[in-house]
Image: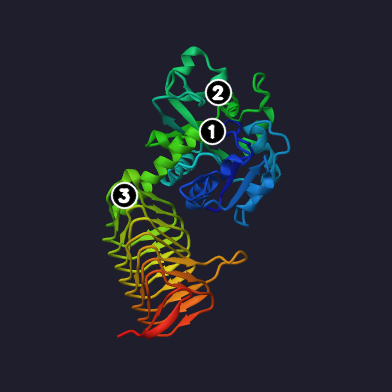
Amino acid sequence: MKDLRTIILAAGKGTRMKSETPKVLHGLCGQPMIQYVLDVVKFVGSLKIYIVLGYKPELVRASLPGEIVPVLQKRLLGTADAVRCAKQHFRDYRGDVLVLCGDTPLLDKDVVKRLIRKHKKSKAACSVLTSVVSDPQGYGRIIRGEKGVVIAIREEKDATEFEKNIVEINTGVYCFRSQDLFKAIRAIKMNKKKKEFYLTDIVELFVDQGLRIETVEAGDPSEGLGVNTREDLALAESFLRKKILKKFMAEGVTIVDPETTYIHKNVSIGCDTIIKPFTVIESHVRIGKNCVIGPFARLRPGTKIHDTVEVGNFAEVSRSQIGKKSLMKHFGFLGDAWVGSQVNIGAGVVTANFDGRQKNKTRIEDRAFIGSDSILVAPVKIGKEAMTGAGCVVTRGKVVPDKQVVVGVPGRIIKRRE
């Protein structure tokens, strides 16, 4: 949208997380929390994105795409002050401003888009995304007047006992008319209890000026969850994980036990593949059709599994490719390996890919047979239809020619494979 810009508030340390890591960089399903917010902003089509940084800004900045404009909040004086820090970028801008928090990773893209559309259609000064929850503790409450119109947002520390019983909360997602926002924000006064400037106070200022306030309610109460503690982080992880698994099952993937299956973002899995219990599939893994993965398997980033492959119990694969109809049914480790089609990887096979300085490659050609407990000390190459005997150690730099059988420690060729 050409008339939409976004400010993401990500300056806070996250004191209740009890961590030296900036809160928005804590991981959820394989990627930083802030990335989920960025995905929402990109989906709604924001022309420019500004992110307000405060605690360890260099760490957060390093994790962001280059097109995002960082804004530094030198003193952490609250959300209104954070927005005020970005004011210089909006001097000649007359469009709308989307403001959201970097610690709300569960936002629904379509709901945020609906908020923006309603804001534009209604010509409101401010539109707020709200949520109705069973336990509103810790969140700002939406205060409505007699006709149901929003007249204030009250932070919990300032709420009366009656207001604390309100279950409609503020999610921290707003859409403003730019000129109204930056004109009114100057009048926000410091909260005496928190010694901060609350962005939520702007609602009462707008009401006093007779400006229109609109709301959109999130469909799922969990969408408005802000991550403030480790417990919140675990709840967010659970929510996102279930969402990911539900998507794969709808696409034709069998997940035998969703409660014990962990699949990160940015994973692709072909239809009719079966994921067995206690399997972990990390980001940037690609799995083909008709595969069987697990139980107790771990596929790490950079792994590509072709069609009709089996990776069984206690097997770990990292930055490796396994070709069609190949089998790795039992415990073992493949790291930085290229495995062809119809290869058998026996129980206990390990590619020793790290020499203390760098990771090295292993290449196993089509229809090779790697015997149980073989160790392949990379870099190494096993030719087509070649075989290693049980317990064999193929030493660094070795090339086993096609159809040759190698046995022993160190491995030596003894015959041609019939």
Q: Tell which tag, 2 or 3, sits nearer the viewer.
A: 3
Q: Position of residue 79 (x, y in %)?
A: 62, 33
Q: Tell which tag, 1 or 3, sits nearer the viewer.
A: 3
**Res. 274 visible in picture:** yes
Marks 1/3: CA–CA distance: 31 Å
Question: Which residue is the site of mark 2?
Answer: 155
Relative to 29, say whether 76 is above or below: above
Q: Residue at x 47, y 52 (%)?
A: 43
Q: Give the crowd class for mark 1: few <14, some 14-19, many >=20 residues within 10 Å.
A: some
Choose between 343 and 390: the one closer to the eye: 390
Question: Which residue is the site of mark 3?
Answer: 277
Q: Amino acid at mark 3?
A: Pro
Question: Which residue is the site of mark 1?
Answer: 228
Going from N to C along the chain, the mark reached first, 1 or 3, is: 1
Q: Tell which tag, 2 or 1, sits nearer the viewer.
A: 1
Going from N to C along the chain, the mark reached first, 2 or 1, is: 2
Q: Residue at x 60, y 37 (%)?
A: 19
Q: Amino acid at mark 2?
A: Glu
Q: Residue at x 44, y 55 (%)?
A: 282
